[in-house]
Image (cartoon, rainbow, N blue to C red):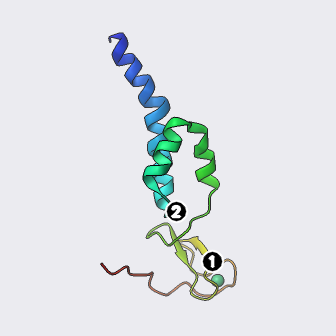
Amino acid sequence: MSYEVKQLLVIFCFFVLPGIVGAWIASTKGRNTLGWFFICAFFPPTIMAIIIQSPIKEVEGHYRECPACRELQSWKLSACKYCGAAMTRAPHVHEE
Ligand SMILES: [Zn+2]
C-alpha cells in the first residue's frame, strides 16, 4: 500500500468512522444527523456527548412519547417508566 492510501485509511478510521457512528446515534434520537457527523468527525470524543444526550422527539423503533406524561422513552417499553401508563397508543404518524 502506498503512503497516501494508508493515510486515507487512518483518516477514515479516526475521523469518518466516529462521524458515522455519531450521526447514527443522533438520528436515533431525532437530532441533527449532519451536524453530529461533523462534530464527531472533527472531534471524535464528542461521541460520548451524543450518547448521553436525551432524545428530543419520537423516532420510530427507538423512542416514543408517553401518551399521559409526554416523557420520551425506549420504543420497546410496554408501560411508561415515569407514570406507568400503558404505551399501547400508535406512534405519531407524520403526514406529508
Ligand atoms: Zn408516562
Q: Residues within 10 Å of mark 2 (few under 14, many from 20)?
A: many
Side of 95 relative to 56 (left or right): left
Three-letter residue code for mark 1: Glu
CB of mark 1 near ligand 1 (< 8 Å): yes
Work out how far the residue at label 1 is from the one at label 2, CA to CA, in angstroms: 13 Å
**What's the amino acid at mark 2?**
Lys
Earlier sequence position, callout 1 versus callout 2: 2
**Residue 15 at x, y percent in the picture:** 48, 33
Residue linked to disc 1:
71
Which residue: 59% across, 74% down? 72
Q: Given contact means CB atoms under 8 Å apart, are the residues at marks 1 and 2 in contact?
A: no
Q: Residue furthest top?
A: 2
Screen quadrant of the C terminus: bottom left
**Residue located 67% across and 85% down the image:** 84
Q: Quadrant of ligand 1?
A: bottom right
Of residues 24 and 61, the one drawn nearer to the viewer in this rendering: 24
Q: Residue furthest left?
A: 96
